[in-house]
Amino acid sequence: MAVAFDEMNGPGGDLRQAYRELSRWLKDTPPDALEYRRQEAELLFRRIGITFAVYGDSEAQERLIPFDVIPRIISAKEWTLLEKGLKQRVRALNMFLRDIYHGRDILRANIIPDDLIFQNPVFRPEMNGQDVPHEVYVHIAGIDIVRVNAEDFIVLEDNARTPSGVSYMLENREIMMRLFPDLFARHRVAPVERYPDELLSALRSVAPLSASAEPTVALMTPGVYNSAYYEHSFLADKLGIELVEGRDLIVKNDEVFMRTTEGLKRVDVIYRRVDDDFLDPLTFRPDSALGVPGLMSAYAAGNITLANAVGTGIADDKAIYSYMPDVVKFYLSEEPILKNVQTWRCREPKDLSYVLDNLADLVVKEVHGSGGYGMLIGPAATKATIEAFRDKLKREPEGFIAQPTLALSTCPTCTTSGLAPRHVDLRPFVLTGRDRTTIVPGGLTRVALKEGSLVVNSSQGGGTKDTWILDE
Amino acid sequence: MLSRTAENLYWLARYVERAEYLARTIDATLRVTALPTAYIGKTNEWDSALLTAGVSASFYEAYQEANETNVVEYLSFSSDNPSSIRNCIEAARLNSRSVRTALTSEMWDTINSAWIELQEVWGKGTSTREELARFLRFVQETSLRFDGSAYRTMLRNDAYWFSRLGLHLERADNTARILDVKYHVLLPEEEHVGGPLDFYQWTSILRSVSALTAYHWVYRETLKPWLIADLLILNDTLPRSLASCYGNLVRNLDQIGVAYGRQGAAQRHARGVRNRLEHSHMDDIFQHGVHEFIQEFISDNSRLGEIITKQYLI
């Protein structure tokens, strides 16, 4: 594996421009002062209750995501490029979804094989031919970005269903501003605090035509036991909208209402953080207690906007991912600005045999997996693990893709043995409303806290950092 | 507001109030039982504590004997007792999490911090009287902080009123339960007034509703059972009296009615109960039976809870 690109010290150890002030400040700040601030930050997180639940972890039902107090910095120039690339990518995702559930030009042009769509469990036949308000499918996208050098931003994963993490972007900033006012004074950091405002106006802009001039928006959560519940309540609070559960909603005459102390009140837009499968027991899983019976028929009648739309999973599927550069070209006739990671599709015999021959060097992921579960990181795995994986792969090749092990870029991070480089990724949040796409300058930087680890997922020991986009 | 939000706020306030009441009851019982037997007689005060908490039946399914260790454990730390202090705090925290958007950060902070702090206590309980006393004080202080935060920081809208409804309904229930269990020591017929036995019983009653000092200020008298009953039932200057709770319940329900432009069964029922309290005199109550009066009140009060639930919370 190549030596990782360090975002502060650059190739060859040349301090990069964006980190100049930070580097100076770090030299002036004694390590115990950093440690003290770190403890203070942790206390704040716990008191505010910014916790997440790890499924299957009964010992610690609510855990803190470790927060690293050293910010990750991106220059204005880099951001401009990234922003352009993200907007392009999300535009293509939306056009792709509209096409897949309507004309299917992209299938007729033989760019994506039919069975990858129709055999795919996240494809929703219920959405065939159904118009969604204002043709927006992915209102909120979280695009996972990694870097391997100073020039390129590479998309690791598109999250077009119910991406989470934006509350950390906002809370990390709040806490950093409280703990390090002096450090902010030395930088011109673009603010992120208008995200809730942007989100609300995007959501209101896509209200169905039957909504009143002042559409009612609600945020739908699976409930207090969901791992991202804190974020749901945080966003509902910041947006000033009701945080509803399935049992708060009722469908009557194809309209959706919430039960209030003053009787039923119509809802026009639902920012739902509930998976497709659980939305409506009449259409999807009949055992879902989280959903609202009849919601899909109100959706079909055009009386409710669901954000994100139903069926967007087909766009962020890992098998579809490998086609994204072609998808961008097909719909926009533009060269993709953001690169893809080279991906071998194990469903294709030629790719499979290459993957089987090189398992020790590759990362193999489940097509439908997420959260960093069920993947093989070749270089870090034991022989036995690799062999077990080989059997799995042979049994069900279409369930997997493989990618080279990327030397994710590193950022200086507080560790028990002082500052040290740790691998990071970045999830910016892209909002699409009726007629514009916006990105608040920032995102969630996740950091793999274990030395050498490339897994940044919070469920597996990853932490977060505040992400600074410099304004000049 | 969402019915579920209102329901959560209402129950949140009830749980916090109940936790405080339990802490007070245990505290008062500890004081009485620390006295020599000559002063308190042969009644088992721990049994009374279970009765006033309304968990006597379930307690005896799990324990043989109502002694200090068992009852303190059951009322404070047991996770099997749905109304233990522990479960009240757990439920309050869970409710708070569900309705975070309707709470002010001060209210959330109070509940969340207490919950974090008490995790340790749940693990190992309290091993000494001092620790127990500290724990009971902490629970009472949490309730005070929560109540104070709500009072000082909440918008005066339906969220606040539903929270107050829970508080006053629970409070009325608690006061009525003490009276229900202890009414016999308040009966004026048993005139061995001033005997040490009764004196400590009376003190204990007043202490569990934090009204011992108030009594002296209101009546400027030595403890008299009928005055104690008067204070707890009819005197609307005492925040924990039935009359005061109903004055507040009526007011909060009226505020909701005005805000929503609509009144209903809850408003009518609450006014009915308050009017009865307003027009009652202690003499009549004693004449017709304190016990019957209290029993009727408890059932009226829980009826109000049902009506509020039906009208607003589901």
Image: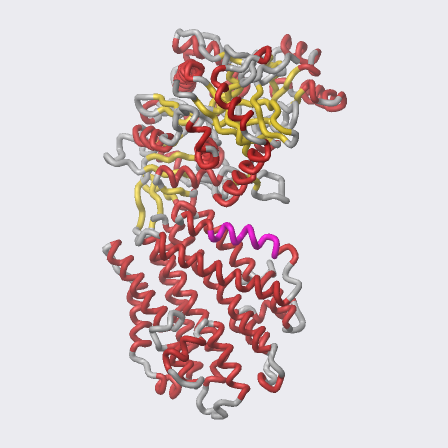
Foreground pick, A311 / A426: A426
Q: Which residues are magenta?
A: B110-121
In this figure, which colouring scheme has been used for the structure? secondary structure
Q: Quadrant of residue B213?
A: bottom left
In the orientation shown, which residue stands out farthest toward the right? Answer: A384
Q: Residue at x 26, y 58 (%)?
A: B257
Q: Quadrant of residue B131?
A: bottom right
Compared to residue A55, the image places residue A452 above or below, namely above
Left or right of A171? Residue B72 is right
Instruction: Give the percent coordinates (x, y) of residue B103.
Output: 40, 49
Placement of A327 over or under A299, stated as above or below: above
Q: Nearer the viewer, residue B188 or A400?
A: B188
Is A118 drawn above or below residue B51 in the view shown? Answer: above
Magenta residues, dominant SS class: helix
Answer whether residue A249 is visible to the viewer in this image: yes
Residue B192 drawn at (x, y percent): 50, 92
**Residue A393 image position (x, y, % from top left):** 67, 19
Q: Is residue A403 magenta?
A: no
